[in-house]
Amino acid sequence: MSNLQKVVTIDGPSGVGKSTISRRVAANLSFTYLDTGAMYRAVALHLKETAVDLDDEASLRTSLDTLSLKLLPAAGESDDVGVILNGRDVSQDIRSPEMSMLASKVSALSPVREKLTHMQQEIGREGNIVAEGRDTGTVVFPLASWKFYLDADPKERMRRRAEQLREKGEQVDEGELLQMIIKRDHDDQARTIAPLCKAEDALLVDTGMLTINEVTEVLLRVIKEKNSALSG
Ligand code: DC
């Protein structure tokens, strides 16, 4: 398979169904699911708790040097991956709307991106990975064999996220949620380092009109077709 890596990358903005789809694709292929967003969320929590001055690059680097981060497989198909930060289980703490916004903010800092990109490349070195995030096809695994970029209208993404939050028993202000989605999209796309964008060689899939099952089927079909073309 030339110098391509046996890696699937699935990038796109928040609320397009990336996590569920990535977990299903990984389970179907017996690959490991790598949730890079969970890593940015854990770093955001770490930097918040240690009250690091984000403008002080030396302190930021020292704080990142002492960080220990472990990802645990998700308990079930609809569960998020587990995250152990400095020996403590933060799997739930990192999923708040506050951590979504803070993760987006700290992800623009180059020491943070350098550290996590390196960790992600180490995890994916042997292949057999489905990596999900914002820059996995463009920066982390530019030589991935299968790249996808999922997108959908922000209003549709807001409706899906609202449904998920309500299922968890949370109150939702749809207007506020839509504003947060639009702001996070903007910040993720506008940052100078590794912005959210489609890799040139990624397949764009609009998930707005498709169910999670339909998108998963499209991805698996493309992966399997390309796999036989590469190995045949
Ligand atoms: O996928 P998520 O919502 O858990 O990601 C949280 C934030 O982390 C997202 O707004 C931007 C950042 N992120 C990133 O910059 N690069 C990635 N590969 C994954 C996430």
Image: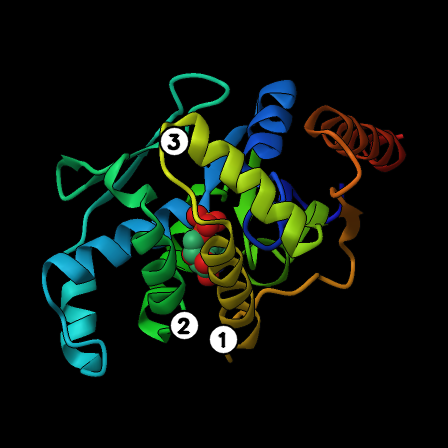
Type of amino acid under label 1: Ile
Q: Position of residue 178 (x, y in %)?
A: 53, 57
Type of amino acid under label 3: Val
Colour scheme:
rainbow
The residue closer to the viewer here, 152 or 80, is 152
The answer to whether the beta carbon of the residue marked 3 is less than 8 Å from any atom of ligand 1 is no
Question: Which badge, 1 or 3, is on the more N-terminal residue?
Answer: 3
Q: Which mark is residue 83?
A: none
The residue closer to the viewer here, 34 or 150, is 150
Q: Are marks 1 and 2 in contact (CB under 8 Å)?
A: yes
Q: Position of residue 207 (x, y in %)?
A: 74, 42
Q: Residue at x 50, y 40 (%)?
A: 162
Picture mark count: 3
Type of amino acid under label 2: Ala
Residue 198 to residue 211: above or below: below
Q: Residue at x 35, y 59 (%)?
A: 103
Secondary element type, mark 1: loop
Q: Position of residue 167 (x, y in %)?
A: 44, 26
Q: Is residue 127 visible?
A: no
Q: Quadrant of the C terminus?
A: top right
Q: Residues within 10 Å of mark 2 (few under 14, many from 20)?
A: some
Quarter residue 109 falls in: bottom left
Report which residue position mark 1 lands on.
193
The answer to whether the beta carbon of the residue marked 2 is less than 8 Å from any atom of ligand 1 is yes
Q: Alpha carbon of mark 3 to alpha carbon of mark 2: how far?
A: 23 Å
Residue 62 to residue 178: above or below: below
Callout in the foreground (1, 2): 2
Residue furthest to the left in view is 50
Q: Which mark is residue 108?
A: 2
